[in-house]
Image: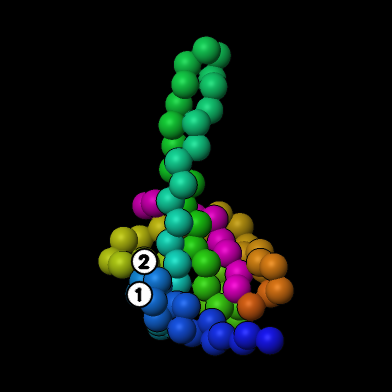
Amino acid sequence: MFVESPDNFLDDFGVSCSQGATNFTGLLDMPDQTFDLGGTSIQSSEYSLTFLTGIATFLNGDVVTVSGVSYVARGAPNKLDDGVFSAIKMSRV
């Protein structure tokens, strides 16, 4: 069985994040989504931050800074897969 520390993964791919006085490392995703609105195609980025579960607590409207850029949490985080990581959807301020 191969066991790897999630900290190693974050060290390799993570970016610096902060929420209030809490500093942590997270993974920022910015996938584009395309929507069809009445025959017009609209492209939008949906920001998501993945972090170690329990390292930070988010509520809807909380501000988090990722690599010096401010975002607002859109709801509460969801645990991913085995629960080691959680993710939160965000909007750029």
* Residue positioned 54% across, 22% down in the render: 36
Q: Is residue 43 magenta?
A: no
x then y, percent, for residue 83: 69, 74
Q: Residue furthest front?
A: 1
Seen in the picture, residue 32 relative to 4 is either above or below; the reply is above
* Residue positioned 44% across, 37% down in the render: 44
Which amino acid type is marked by label 1? Ser
Residue 31 shown left or right of residue 78 in the figure: left
Seen in the picture, residue 44 relative to 85 is either above or below; the reply is above
x then y, percent, for residue 60: 57, 59
Which amino acid type is marked by label 2? Val
Residue 85 shown left or right of residue 18 in the figure: right
User: Where on the picture, by quarter, is residue 79?
Assistant: bottom right
In the rendered image, which residue does mark 1 sit on? 16
x then y, percent, for residue 33: 50, 37
Q: What residue span does the magenta drawing correspond to?
A: 85-93
In the rendered image, which residue does mark 2 sit on? 66
C-alpha distance separating marks 1 and 2: 6 Å
